[in-house]
Image: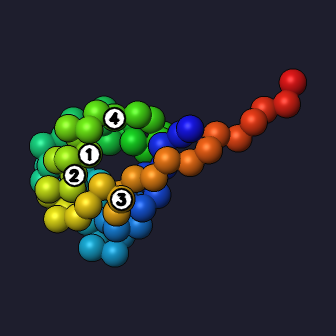
Amino acid sequence: MAMSYNKLWKLLIDKNIMKKDLREMAGLSTNVIVKMGKNGDVSTEVLRKICKALQCGMNGIVEIVPEKNTVS
């Protein structure tokens, strides 16, 4: 299973918030934003901070999607 933050990026667009603004609002590091940009795993603390900053639930910013099978 993989993480997808597409909902978060769409929410930022809808609210006219830039990633750097989110970083400042939620007190996140640049590395966390980069990791999320690559659909990497982040802590629940990070997700909680984002939800608090954007006043939304976790299901509004992240979803778990099945990983694509690779054929050898």
Whether residues under marks 4 and 1 lie with C-beta atoms below 8 angstroms apart, the answer is: yes
What residue is shown at x 64% (from left), y 40% (from top)? 67
- Find disc 1 in the rendering and name its residue: 47
Mark with earlier residue (4, 3): 4
Mark with earlier residue (2, 4): 4
Q: Nearer the viewer, mark 4 or mark 3?
A: 3
Would residue 30 be visible to someone looking at this image?
Answer: no
The count of marks equals 4
Whether residues under marks 2 and 1 lie with C-beta atoms below 8 angstroms apart, the answer is: yes
Whether residues under marks 3 and 1 lie with C-beta atoms below 8 angstroms apart, the answer is: no
Mark with earlier residue (2, 3): 2
Which amino acid lies under the numbered mark 1 shown in the image of this protein? Leu
**Element on which disc 3 rests:** helix
**Element on which disc 1 rests:** helix
x and y percentages locating residue 47 in the rendered image? 26, 45
| Distance between mark 4 and mark 3 Cα atoms | 15 Å
- Find disc 3 in the rendering and name its residue: 59
Q: Is residue 30 left or right of residue 3?
A: left
Which amino acid lies under the numbered mark 2 shown in the image of this protein? Ile
What residue is shown at x 20% (from left), y 38% (from top)? 45
**Element on which disc 4 rests:** loop
Location of residue 28 by image quarter: top left
What residue is shown at x 85% (from left), y 30% (from top)? 71
Considering only vertical position in the picture, is 47 above or below 12? above
x and y percentages locating residue 9 in the rendered image? 39, 60
Quarter in which the N terminus is drawn: top right
- Find disc 2 in the rendering and name its residue: 50
What residue is shown at x 26% (from left), y 38% (from top)? 44
Q: Which mark is residue 42?
A: 4
Which amino acid lies under the numbered mark 3 shown in the image of this protein? Asn
